[in-house]
Every structure is written in structure tokens, then in C-alpha cells.
Image (cartoon, rainbow, N blue to C red):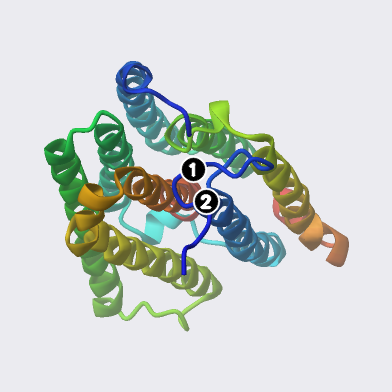
């Protein structure tokens, strides 16, 4: 069976199907994270007292992770741009870097979580930590999901470059759209949880 | 970007690097401002403005929203409407929701 419009645009939408598909998925993701942000606002404005994130959390580590994640967004878009310029070797390098940076993000997050647990700070400790762990863990799961997809596109999935380069380029673009969204969520999480 | 040519991509690579530098600069700014320990209202306002600018840069350039098809703009317009509704939900449901700012 042939899936229609994987490499060429559908005449009515002007888009290949996967692109509209990923945007609809991202729209649902906006609502998922939006619901949690809304919950955060409700909990915070009703709290008698609310700690400053920087008193409990590690701002330098989170700043490092912000830099790491923004860098991985750049390498991701460069991976796609490399395919557009028919430079497969550069694609491999940039996609590899994207995966590496994502893993760095997860390792830093692991150290952050461990430090909290060592100090007996758990989701059950207070409302702030409850929302902190919920939102960052959900975001972390999104990072893991992205790593799996990107690793596939870097490794076995990249064989498609030889058989159907346009479709493969589209796949990388779609994976990129997801990856930039995960970065975008962090751009809001970082100040909201750590700096305010 | 479906019909983008290699030459156009070369030009946009420069844009990506510029956006990268801007995002790094804004990250430094947002962290620096947090050390000023502004009032909660001011800190929230400034942090959200900086975050929105950063997010817009990512969405516009990395996610190619500067040149997209109408189907995506309509999808996002609908999403934005419901997202804003979701953000105001706490205010609709709670009468004491301004307590923090007193």
C-alpha cells in the first residue's frame, strides 16, 4: 500500500501529509502543556506562600540545559538544511550532534533530580516540587521520545536517503518540528520554574 | 518550505545562526534579570515577555512559520484561541485568584 503525499504536497492543503499531521499533533501538545501551565497558575495564585524557584532549584545547571537544548535545536535545523543542500555527510554530523546534546540534557536533568532526592525533596514534599517534577518529567519524556526518533533517522532510517531522498528530508523536517516544540516548551519552563 | 531550493537554504543558514545568537543573548538577559529580584508582578511580566520573544524566534525561523501554508496558520489560530482560554480558566474558576498580587 502506498501512503499518499509523503513527498509531494497535497494540492488542497499545499502540504505533504506528515507536515499537517505533525502540526495537528503539536496543537494537541500545546493543550497538554497548556493544561499543566494553567494548573501551575491556579496553584500558585492560590498558595499562601510560594517559594522562589532559585531558592530550591539549581539555576546554573538549568541555564546550561537551556543552552544545550537551544543548541540542539540549531543542529537539528542544520541537519534538515544539510539534506536540502544534498549534503548527507553533514546531515549525519548535525543529527548526531542533536542526539548527543539531547543526551547531555538528560544527564544534567538526572543530576538535578538526584540532588533533589538526596536532600529528601520529592514531589510529595510541597506543591511547588509536585508541579516541578510533573512538568519537567513530562518534558523529559518528550526529550527521550525525540532521541528515539532522531536516532532512528540518524541510523537505520537514513537508508531512505538513497531510495526516496525527498521523503526522507520531509521526515527529518517533521522530526525537527517536534524537536523545536520541545525546545519551545523548555523556553517557558525554565523561567517559570527556576527564575520566578 | 516545500519548494525551497538549495540556494534559499544557504541564505537561511545565516538566519539560523543569527537566531541562535539572539536566543543565547536572551537567555543571558532572562537569567541576569532574575538576579535583580524584582517584585513578583514585574518579574513575571519581564520573564514572560523574554520567553515569548524567544519562543517566537524558534517558531518563526526554526519551525519555518515565517513562510507556511494557510492550513497550518488556521490550525495554530484555533490552538492559540483555546490556549488563551485555558490560561484564563483559573480566573474563571476562582474568585480569590488575585491573592498573590496583593
Query: Which structural element holds mark 2?
Result: loop
Whether residue B7 is situated above or below residue B63 in the rendered picture: above
Relative placement, left or right, of A100 versus B92 is left
The residue carrying mark 2 is A5
Is A113 in front, or is A97? A97
Q: Which mark is residue A41?
A: none
The residue carrying mark 1 is A8
Whether residue B20 is situated above or below residue A70 in the rendered picture: above
Res. A105 in view: no
Is B37 in front, or is A186? A186
Q: Chain of mark 2?
A: A
Relative placement, left or right, of A40 versus B11 is right
What residue is shown at x 27% (from left), y 35% (from top)?
A: A78
Whether residue A175 is situated above or below residue B17 in the rendered picture: below
Whether residue A46 is situated above or below residue A19 in the rendered picture: below
Res. A59 in view: yes
Relative placement, left or right, of B96 versus A7 is right
What residue is shown at x 20% (from left), y 56% (from top)?
A: A159
Few, some or many C-alpha atoms within 10 Å of disc 1 (few <14, some 14-19, many ≥20)? some
Disc 2 and disc 1 in contact, CB within 8 angstroms: yes
Query: Which structural element holds mark 1?
Result: loop
Few, some or many C-alpha atoms within 10 Å of disc 2 (few <14, some 14-19, many ≥20)? some
Horizontal and vertical percent position of residue A125: 46, 80
Amino acid at each position: 500500500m502506498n501512503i499518499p503525499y509523503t513527498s509531494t504536497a497535497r494540492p488542497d492543503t499545499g502540504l505533504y501529509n506528515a507536515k499537517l499531521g505533525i502540526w495537528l499533533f503539536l496543537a494537541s501538545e500545546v493543550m497538554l502543556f497548556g493544561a499543566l501551565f494553567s494548573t501551575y497558575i491556579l496553584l500558585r495564585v492560590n498558595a499562601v506562600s510560594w517559594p522562589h524557584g532559585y531558592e530550591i532549584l539549581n539555576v546554573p545547571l538549568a541555564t546550561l540545559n537551556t543552552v544545550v537544548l537551544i543548541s540542539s535545536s540549531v543542529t537539528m535545523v542544520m541537519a534538515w538544511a544539510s539534506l536540502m543542500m544534498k549534503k548527507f555527510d553533514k546531515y549525519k554530523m548535525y543529527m548526531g550532534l542533536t542526539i548527543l546534546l539531547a543526551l547531555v540534557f538528560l544527564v544534567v536533568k538526572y543530576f538535578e533530580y538526584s540532588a533533589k532526592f538526596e536532600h529528601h525533596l520529592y514531589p510529595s514534599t510541597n506543591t511547588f516540587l509536585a508541579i516541578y517534577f510533573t512538568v519537567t518529567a513530562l518534558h523529559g519524556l518528550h526529550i527521550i521520545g525525540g532521541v528515539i526518533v532522531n536516532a532512528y533517522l540518524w541510523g537505520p532510517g537514513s537508508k531512505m536517503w538513497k531510495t526516496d531522498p525527498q521523503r526522507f528530508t520531509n521526515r527529518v523536517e517533521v522530526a525537527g518540528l517536534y524537536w523545536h516544540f520541545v525546545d519551545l516548551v523548555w523556553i517557558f519552563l525554565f523561567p517559570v520554574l527556576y527564575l520566578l | 518550505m516545500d519548494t525551497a531550493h538549495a540556494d534559499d537554504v544557504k541564505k537561511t543558514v545565516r538566519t539560523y545562526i543569527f537566531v541562535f545568537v539572539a536566543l543565547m543573548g536572551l537567555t543571558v538577559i532572562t537569567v541576569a534579570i532574575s538576579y535583580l529580584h524584582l517584585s513578583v508582578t514585574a518579574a513575571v511580566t519581564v520573564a514572560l515577555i523574554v520567553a515569548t520573544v524567544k519562543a517566537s524566534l524558534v517558531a518563526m525561523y526554526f519551525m519555518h512559520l515565517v513562510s507556511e501554508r494557510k492550513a497550518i496558520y488556521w490550525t495554530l489560530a484555533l490552538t492559540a484561541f483555546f490556549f488563551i482560554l485555558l490560561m484564563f480558566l483559573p480566573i474563571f474558576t476562582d474568585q480569590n485568584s488575585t491573592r498573590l498580587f496583593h
